[in-house]
Amino acid sequence: MPFGYTMKNDGTLADTARLTEEPWKSFIATAKQNKVRVIPTVMWGDGEAIHRILSNPTTRIALEDEIANMVKENGFDGVDIDFEAKKHETIDYFSTFLKGLYQRMGNKWVYLYG
């Protein structure tokens, strides 16, 4: 579960650890050969931005799509969502986001931190 991705303020992913490049590519290939699941973490700690993105259906759906596509395109086994510092009023939007993400992920794993 490498802490590989963070979120930009516009609600799009940033491959902060460059998981799609070497030496990660070789490391991940070796892990998969040894039947070890590769599930990167998406970390976000800006409560205001989280609320702004998740409370807007257009940006929330775009984020659900982007995360699911990132997992599938890179052959990851799932994703770990680590969104911290959420505002209380974000709770229902966050639940809707998770439901949408689960639907898009198919048989991939979805972990939730905290």
Image (tube, rainbow, N blue to C red):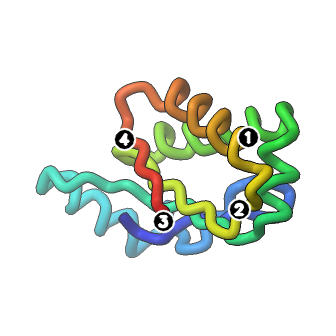
- The amino acid type, in three-letter code, at marker 1 is Tyr
Considering only vertical position in the picture, is 77 above or below 38?
above
Which quadrant of the structure image shows residue 60? top right
Disc 3 and disc 1: Cα gap in Å?
Answer: 28 Å
Q: Secondary structure at mark 4?
A: strand
- The amino acid type, in three-letter code, at marker 2 is Lys
**Percent from the top left, x then y, of residue 100?**
61, 29
Q: Are marks 3 and 1 in contact (CB under 8 Å)?
A: no
Estimate how packed mark 2 is, as few (under 14), some (14 to 19) or many (20 or more) residues with alpha carbons within 10 Å.
some
Disc 3 and disc 4: Cα gap in Å?
Answer: 18 Å
Mark nearer the viewer, 3 or 1: 1
Estimate how packed mark 3 is, as few (under 14), some (14 to 19) or many (20 or more) residues with alpha carbons within 10 Å.
some
Q: In percent of the image, x 25 and y 52: which residue is there? A: 37
Which quadrant of the structure image shows residue 84? bottom right
Give the mark nearer the N terminus: 4 vs 1.
1
Residue 26's disc is: none
Residue 86's disc is: 2
Mark nearer the viewer, 4 or 1: 1
Give the mark nearer the N terminus: 3 vs 4.
3
Residue 19's disc is: 3
Residue carrying label 1 = 93
Q: Are marks 4 and 2 in contact (CB under 8 Å)?
A: no
**Percent from the top left, x then y, of residue 3?**
47, 71
Q: How many labels were placed on the picture?
A: 4
Residue 8 visible at all: yes
Q: Secondary structure at mark 3?
A: loop
Disc 4 and disc 2: Cα gap in Å?
Answer: 22 Å
Mark nearer the viewer, 4 or 2: 2
